[in-house]
Each structure stands twice: as structure tokens, then as C-alpha cells.
Amino acid sequence: MTGLRVLRPGPMSLLQDAGRRGWQHLGVSPCGPLDGHAAAWANRLLDNAWGAPLLEIALGGVELLAEGDTWLASAGAELDLSLDGATIPGWSRFAVRAGQHLRIGFARRGQRLYLAAAGGFCAEPVLGSVGTQVREGLGGLDGRGGRLTEGDRLACSPATFSTAASVPWRFRGDDHDAPLRVIIGGDAPDFAAEQLEAFFAREWQLSPQSDRMGARLLGEPLVAPSRQWSMGVSRGAIQVPPDGRPIILQADHQTMGGYPILGWLHPLDQWRLAQCSARQDLRFTRVDIAAAQADLHRFYRFFKS
Amino acid sequence: MIRLEPAGAEALLLVLAEQPTPDLPLRIAALADDIRTELGALLTDLVPGWTSLLLHYDLLRTDHLQLAERLVPLLERWRAAPVPTVAGHLHEIPVWYAGEDLAEVARACELTVEQVTELHSAAEYRVGAIGFAPGFAYLGELHERLALPRRATPRTVVPAGSLAIAERQTAIYPQASPGGWHLLGLCPWRLFEPARTPPCPLMLGDRVRFRPVDEATYRRERGR
């Protein structure tokens, strides 16, 4: 066993894995990485299993000390990454030796960096997952939903790779400005046709009040229909509360919701949204559910097998 | 009529009724058990709502059409099944009626504090849904004399164990969390504990009665 000592934890660094599945009927949020694409690549670079525990580093600002030799990999937000002062490229795996300092600067583009370690970081799962759910006090290194703090030790395995490796450019996802794709459904038939049109025609902004639970949109409000009975909700659901400002459910979403739902974000675009910064302009376009499922199926086939 | 609808790329929603009825939670729980037994390998989560059941499925193992097809015989069986005669498990939960909003609730309902406590603890409630937070059980149906809209401004922190009411519902907050319900009292027991099996003692369709206790009993039973 080797590991990393946390010298500077950054504002919001969380241990995550594939999420807490199978407990939503008791009100437990599914949790997991906000950007599942970058998280999957960070693990894949180290030949880790799907969902091996890794760090989700929001905004950056982290410093770690290697206590032994191992390999790490990063993917996600664009920022300065250096090992004892030498620049490390993003979307790559790299060797670290005992005593070396890894410095992670602040994000220039994108919001979240995923840092994986050979074999995954070790922590005791709570309800089957180490995923940190701060609001619910579940998971993380302490098992009680704590974010990374100074002095924490992230245990991982030693590893040997013969060469460095990087994710090819074309797979990194550079379509930051493309509209986000939406599968229409749910309560959409209860919305007035011009309200649906307005959702797609209008320009929205990502609210700084967004969090891991939901991405909130700023813009001219929609007129939402009413719905009476709360029901189970899934990630990516676009809820329209009475104030008319849509909320897109993210990884830490509640299990049930009562607001009318206009549709769901394409899963691959949920991950793109996770890298958008506050006040960023967002536009939406329609996608067929079959096309979205085909894309997601291809993604899972590549990363899960 | 039962409706089957996509709920995003990896979930299927079963809308089972237009309105909740007293028997529905227990019937939805029975359907969820049946589906879990028959199709559990295809599913990651089953989330009962007031009138619905959301099935999160594994896209590598099934898709909407295939799952819908396999659900048809289960739904037919469920529709034909008699209304369950076995009532849900009965829980008797101690409550120290000393909530911050007790006096205000009494005033708003034009009752005395004693009458509020009596009305609230006389009834038998049913778990209609579990959600909002881990182990947060929506209990119905609250006496109409106690029905109040949610607070205009939600509290940023409601203490763990708070017994609260809003509209025709009552519930206990298992963890400290923000909340907009009116606080009537405190329950000493822990109602969500991840290390326990099951983590939450209250299940869908279970029955709940509240037993008024004094401060000394509350302190003695705290953390159980």
C-alpha cells in the first residue's frame, strides 16, 4: 500500500466512484462523478475497473505529497498540473515517486478535474459506495460525507506501467459551445406549445447557485403547468418549478420530485454541463431518445467492458 | 389505466393511478418486490412515488421496449391481485412534543397546544412515500384541523429527529437538513443509520403511531 498525503485540499475535492446504487427507494441519492466521461477516462488510463474510487477536484487548488511510488492519471478541466515543478500534460497517466509534490492549479477552462490512482483510492464503502454525498453525510474518506481536508491520506496501490499514455485529442470532448441535447418527455405534453418552443429558442445562463444536486438556469422564466404527486426522478431531468427557471438534476439529485419535468438532458451532455462555468451561456436542442440511448450504449460498451 | 413512459435514457416510469389511495403504498411496495424478484438483474433502482414506480435500468442489459414487454405480465398479475388485507408493520414512535412551532401551530389552527398534541398522537399514519432525504418517510393522513401550508420561509437547518407537519402530511427529519415544515416535537430514535440492516426501519405501507413522552424519556431513549 502506498498513498498520497493531502497538503492542500482545494475548495471542494470529493472522493467519488460509480455512485450509490440500489438505495433510492429509501431516499438515498445516487451520487457519483458530475462528469462521468472525464472520470471514466482517468480510470481507463490506469486500466482501473469502471467506477474505481477517484478524486473529483472542483476548481483545482490542490497539493499532494506522494508517500510511495505509484501511477496517477488526470482528465477533465484544463489547468496547470506539475510534479516537483515539471509540467504534466492533462488527460494522461504519469509515474510519481515517494517524496514528490503534485501541484494542481486553478481551472482555466472547465470546472472539474478527475485524479485517479492505480487500483483506485481505498476507502470503506457506505451503502455500497465510497461516493461522497455531503448533504446526506454519506461516503468519502471518513464515511460521513466529508470533503477532502488537509492531512488526509489517500491510500492506493503501487503500479508499474512501461510508458506514459494520453487520451487522443478527438476523445477529450471539445464541443464546449454546442447546444445541449434534450430528450423531450415527462410532463412536456402539459406545457403550452409556445413554452416548449421558448425553452429551445431562448438563451439561458448557468446560475452561480448551481451545485452537485442541480444546475439552475437563469433567463426569462417559462410558464410551467402544475403537477400534484411527487414521483421518482432521474439524473438529467429538467424540472420547471413555479418560478419558471429550469433546474437540471445532477449526480446528487434527490430521489423524488414534484415539479413538472420538460425532458432530460442527453447523458453525455450532462457530463458536458458539469464542466460549464457559472454565468456561461447555454442553449438547448432536441434529440431523439433512441439516438441518445445509442450514444450512451456505445459509451458504456467502451468503458464498462 | 397504467401508463409506461420513458424517464430519460435509463429509466422507465410506471404511472399506476391518478390519485393516491390508502392501500396504494402497500400495493406499490408489493409490485416493486415482484419486479425486483423477476427483473432485478436488469434494474439498478426502483423508486416508489405516491402514484408511480420509477425503474432505473441498466442500458447494457435491457432497453425501454424490452423492459416494457417483460413488465406486461407482471402488471396484469398485479392488477388482478386482491387488495392486500395484511396491514403494514405497525411502529410506535416516541415523541417529546416540544417543537419550536407548537405554540404557533396551535394559534394558527385555533386549538390549544394540548389539543394539537392529542390530535396528532391519536391518529394512525401510513408511510406513503420515502424520499427528499435518506429515510424521510411521508406519513398520511394528518387530521384536517392540523393542515397548514408550508412555512413561507423554510428553515436553513431543521434539527435531526424533528417531528414536523405540512398540509395533510407529517414526517420526522432523520438528519439535520433545510426544511419548510412546522416543527411539533422531537423523536429520540435514529431513523436512518447506514450501518444497520435495513438502514431505515420505516417501509412503504407501514403504519405509524406517535407516543407522547416527557423530556426525561426523550433523553433516555436518545440515539436508539
Image (cartoon, coloured by chain):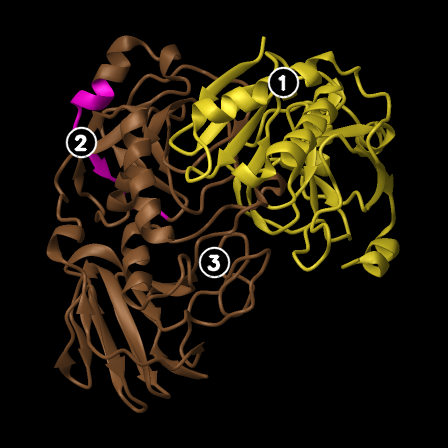
A202 falls in the magenta region: yes
Q: Which residue is mark 3?
A: A131
> Magenta segment range?
A198-211
> Is the residue at mark 2 from the same chain as the one at mark 3?
yes
Residue A283's disc is 2
> Is the residue at mark 1 from the same chain as the one at mark 3?
no
Residue B178 percent location from the top left of the image: 53, 45
Q: Amino acid at mark 2?
A: Arg
Tell which tag, 1 or 3, sits nearer the viewer.
Answer: 1
Residue B52 percent location from the top left of the image: 58, 23
**Residue pictured at 65% horizontal, 30% vertical:** B32
**Residue B215 sits above or below residue A166 on the image:** above
Label 3 chain ID: A
Label 1 chain ID: B
Q: Amino acid at mark 1?
A: Pro
Could one spot residue A290 in this view of the protein?
yes
Q: Which residue is mark 1?
A: B73
User: CB of mark 1 within 8 Å of CB of mark 3?
Assistant: no
**Residue pictured at 76% horizontal, 59% vertical:** B223
Q: Colour of chain A?
A: brown
Tell which tag, 2 or 1, sits nearer the viewer.
Answer: 1
